[in-house]
Image (cartoon, helix red, strand yellow):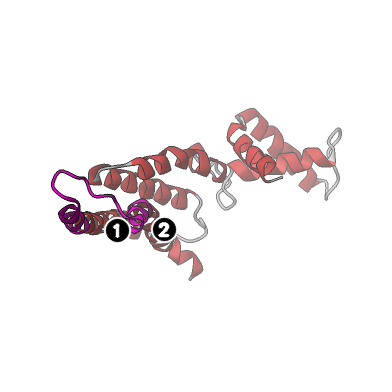
Amino acid sequence: MQHFASLVSLKNNLVSDEELQRSKALLQGFKESGGLLPPGASDADMWEARRKVSSVLHPDTGEPIPLPFRMSAFMPVNLPVTAGMLLSTTVPSQLFFQWLNQTYNSAFNYANRNATVPTDYAQLGLSYAVATGTAVGAAFGLGKVVSKLQARLGSGAAAGAGAGVAPPQSFGLKLLTRGMPWFAVATAGAVNALAMRYKEGM
């Protein structure tokens, strides 16, 4: 069932303009008739029309949400970015993918914002800077911590193992190295959502 739901979500990215217009017309006819099914339409047709409209149009503005920032596109767009963060072996590449991830998250949060709340673009820019700065800062700071631990543990292990022998990396250090991208993303993700959309709860 979960795999089926994922496939349906991905299918929402393929809704054409013609399908969208037909779905809007069906829903409008249903509304104007006081809840009666339009001629030739079934209950399943109405649910399908609702799925297409709600996946493409912003609920407040009624305007189409750009494809990369729709809810149904969040997973496929994030896959290569997440892979880049996890597979990065240098600090510069890690910082780049952290910045890219938070830039996308900021745009996603803005595209799906509560549009009934007026947008302050100066505040929006500041929120973006805070979110991306947190991600890059967390990744850079944790990278420095890992490097120092590697150097300290490596020098001690090398002294005991003898010259020319590469010291094995401890399990704890491996866990910290692999967990660094996740921690930076989790921290920055929380800051991003709070910074970009905190006014919606006021």
Q: Residue at x 38, y 44 (%)?
A: 86
Magenta stretch, residue numbers: 152-178
Task: Kindly indicate whether the residue at mark 2 contacts the one at mark 1 (C-beta within 8 angstroms).
Answer: no
Residue 73 is situated, as x and y percent measured from the top left of the image, at 53, 40
Crowd around label 1: few <14 · some 14–19 · many ≥20 (10 Å): many
Residue at image coords 13%, 47%: 163
Q: Is residue 198 above or below residue 189?
A: below
- Per the image, the residue denoted by label 2 is 186
Residue bearing mark 1: 138
Q: CA distance from mark 1 to mark 2?
A: 10 Å
Residue 198, given in percent of the width and then of the height, sits at 44, 65
Q: Is residue 109 magenta?
A: no
The residue shown at (31%, 47%) is: 99
10 Å neighbourhood of mark 2: few (<14), some, or many (≥20)? few
Image quadrant in which you'd find residue 43: top right
Residue sticking out furthest to the bottom: 202
Q: Secondary structure at mark 1?
A: helix
Numbered-mark total: 2
Tell me residue 126's x, y (percent).
30, 59
**Amino acid type assigned to the residue bearing label 1 in the image:** Ala
